[in-house]
Image (cartoon, rainbow, N blue to C red):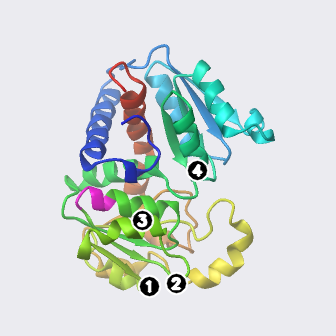
Amino acid sequence: MNHLLKLLDLSKEEILGILNLADQLKYELGHGIRHPLLAGKTLGMIFQKASTRTRVSFETGIYQLGGYGLFLSSHDLQIGRGEPVEDTARVLSRYLDGIMIRTFDQEEVETLARVGSIPVINGLTDFCHPCQVLADLMTVREHKGILEGLKMAYIGDSNNMANSLIVGGLKTGMRVAAACPDGYRPAKEVLDFAADFGDAFTLTGDCLEAAAGADVIFTDVWASMGQEGEFNQRKLVFEGYQINDAVMAVAHPEAMVQHCLPAHRGEEITAEVFEAHAGEIFDEAENRLHAQKAVLCLLMGEDAR
C-alpha cells in the first residue's frame, strides 16, 4: 500500500492489516506505552473542506507518533489560487513526508498521488471517505468480535459514506444492504464493484427491508457539506429515511448504530436512538484517531513503501 485514496484500491488483507495495527496502537495508548514510530516525520494536512474530527484526529495522531502535523487551508496554498495540483504535488513532495487532503474532487487526490513522490491519504472527498470507514469497521469488530458474516445496513443518501461503507463491508466479508431514494443511489463504480458479490449486496428504497436482521445500521446527514442549498429539496426526498424505533425493531436485537457525525437529531436519526447508542457512536469517533494512526505508520514508517 503506497497511498490511501479509496477502499476500492485495497485488498481484504490490507484492510484487516490496518485494523489489526489500529487495535494494537489503541491498546498501547490506553496502557501508557509510547510509540514514536514517526519521529521526525512531517505530515502536511490540506483542508479544502472544514472539519472537526479529521483535523483533530490527524493532528493528534501524528503528534502521538512523534511527528509533526502542518495544517494547510486553501487560503494558505497557491492551489487555492489556481496553481496546478501537479505543481503542488511536486513542491510538497520536496518538503513533507506525507500528505493528508480533505477536498471535493476525488481526481485532485488521485493527481496528488500520481504526480507526487510521497504517500497521500484521502481525508474525505465527495466520492469516498476511507478513513472514516476504516474507523467504522474497527468499531464494529471491537463490539462484535468479527466482521465476516455480519449484516450492515445503510439508510439515507448514497454519498461518500455509503460508497465507502459498501466497499469496505463487502471486502471484509459482510453482507450489505443500502436503502436510498431514487436519484440518490451509490456511484456507478461502487455498484459495478458490488455486482460481483451477488446477493451479499442489496439496494432498495425500503428502510425496513434494508434493516431487517441487521447487526449494525449506519446513516449520515441528508445534505452533506457543500449541499446546504439543496436542503429543503432533500428534506422532502429523504423524509422517512431515518433510523428510528421502527427500523430498530426489525434489526437484530443487539444491533449497533453508527453515525460519522455531526448528527442532526430528528432528521436522519431520532434523538432517542442516538442517545441509546451514543457509546458506540463515540467509540466510532474515537477510533478515527487509532485507524488513521495505523494508516500513517503503514505509509510513512520506516518499513513503508
- Mark 2 and mark 1: span between their CA atoms? 7 Å
Give the residue drawn at x 29%, y 42%: 14
First-in-chain label (2 vs 1) = 2
> Which residue in the protein does label 1 denote?
205
Give the answer, above or below, for where 146 lies relative to 72.
below
Q: Secondary structure at mark 3?
A: helix
Q: Nearer the viewer, residue 134 or 140?
A: 134
> Which residue in the protein does label 4 denote?
107
Q: Secondary structure at mark 2?
A: loop
Name the dominant secondary structure of the magenta segment.
helix
First-in-chain label (3 vs 4) = 4
> Which residue in the protein does label 3 denote?
190
**C-beta proximity under 8 Å, tags 3 and 2:** no
Q: Secondary structure at mark 1?
A: loop
Q: Amino acid at mark 1?
A: Gly
**C-beta proximity under 8 Å, tags 2 and 1:** yes
- Mark 1 and mark 4: span between their CA atoms? 30 Å
**C-beta proximity under 8 Å, tags 1 and 4:** no
Mark 4 surroundings within 10 Å by alpha-carbon count, few (fewer than 14), some (14 through 19), many (20 or more): some
- Mark 3 and mark 4: span between their CA atoms? 16 Å
Residue located farthest toward the top when viewing the structure as drawn? 40
Q: Nearer the viewer, residue 92 or 43?
A: 92
Give the answer, above or below, for where 286 lies relative to 195.
above
Q: Nearer the viewer, mark 2 or mark 4?
A: 4
Quarter assignment of residue 126 = bottom right
Q: Nearer the viewer, mark 1 or mark 4?
A: 4
Mark 3 surroundings within 10 Å by alpha-carbon count, few (fewer than 14), some (14 through 19), many (20 or more): some
